[in-house]
Image: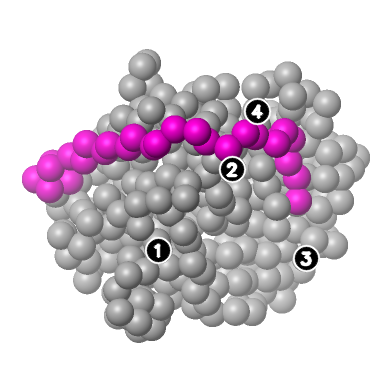
Amino acid sequence: MFSTNHQKFMEMDELSLNKVPYFFIIDFLAQNVEVFKEDKIEKSGLLIDFQNFSNVKKQQPLSKNIEWKSFSETMESFKVGFDKVQKNIHFGNSYLVNYTRKTKIETNLTLEEIFYHSSAKYKVFYKDFFVFFSPETFIKIIDQKIFTYPMKGTIDASVENAAEVLRNDIKEKAEHYTVVDLLRNDLSMVADDVKVDKFQYIDFIKTKQKNLYAMSSEISGTLKPEFEGKLGSIMRKLLPAGSILGAPKPKTLEIILDAEEYDRGYYTGVCGWFDGENLDSCVMIRFIERENDQLYFKSGGGITHMSKLEDEYEEMKNKIYVPIH
C-alpha cells in the first residue's frame, strides 16, 4: 500500500530548506522516490521539459510518417474492474474512483522521439523506461503560496459546442466538484486560507489522433509555517494525488488496487522541479512505458454512480494518443 515513511522525503526537506535546486520523481504508491540535484540530472538519463525548466537540446524535425496502433482490451475485460468499482460506489465505500488500464501499443517512434516531438505542458523521458506528456499540474509553490489545479473531465473537441457540453455534463460536473472538494481539503492539511480561485475553466489539447477539451479549477492557500520550505513533508501529506485516485482516499486506494489488477508504477505519480525558491510539479499522466520489449499506454478516468460502461470505455481509449501534429 501507500508508503509515507520514506527517507527520500526527509532528503527533499533538507534540500529545499537549504534552497538547493533539485528534480524529484515519486511513483503512485510512493514506494520509489528519486531525487536528482541539478548537476546530477544530465547523468541520470532524464530529459525534462517543463515550462520553467528544461534540459533539452533543439531536436531536428521528425522526418518519418508516424505509425501508431493501439490494442485496447475488450469491453468485457474492461467491465470486470468497472463492475467492482461500481459495486463499491453503490455500497457507499467511495463516491469517485479513478479506474485506469494499460493498453498495448505499437509505434515506429522511440520513446525519446515521442518526448522530443510531442507538445505538452510537462514532458519527461526517463532512461528509455517511460515517457509522459502531461497537461496536468499537481502543485505549484510560489513565495510560500501553494496552488493546485485539478483536471477532471475531457471531451472530444469535434463535438458540437464541446466546451459548453463538457461544462454542463451532469456526470463530469459531479466528478469535477468531488475532486475540487477533495483537493481543497487536502491543501487545508498544509495551508491556511484555502480557496477556489477559478472554477471549471477549459483547456484545449491538440493531438495527432483527435483534439480534446479538458476541464480544470484552481485552488490556492498560504503554506502553514511548519511546512514552509519542506517539500518532502508537503508531498507526504498530499499524495497520492486526489485527481487520479478519488474519494475518500484510503478506501478508494483499496478499491483501485483490487479492480485494476496491474501495477501503475510511476504512472499517476508526481514529479517536480524545485529551483531553490519555488516549485512546479505535475501528475504523470498520458504515460507510455516499456515493459521488456513491449510498449504500454496507461490511461483511465473517473467513475461515479452515474458512469456508463460504454462511455468510460471510450474515454479510456480516447486518451491513448500522442500530441504530435
Report which residue position mark 1 lands on: 212
Report which residue position mark 4 lands on: 46
Label 3, label 4: how far apart the Cα atoms are: 28 Å
Report which residue position mark 2 lands on: 123
Identify the element where label 3 is drawn: strand
Give the position of the N terminus as an image quadrant: top left
Q: Residues within 10 Å of mark 2 (few under 14, many from 20)?
A: many
Name the image colouring.
Answer: one colour
Q: Point out residue 84 in the picture as x, y percentages from the top left corner.
A: 18, 50
What residue is drawn where x is 29% and y is 73%? 159
Report which residue position mark 3 lands on: 145
**Residue 191 versus residue 105: which sits nearer the camera?**
105
Is 53 magenta? The answer is yes
Identify the element where label 2 is drawn: strand
Q: Point out residue 213 in the picture as x, y percentages from the top left corner.
A: 42, 68
Label 3, label 2: how far apart the Cα atoms are: 24 Å
State the extent of the magenta-drawn residues as a range: 52-78
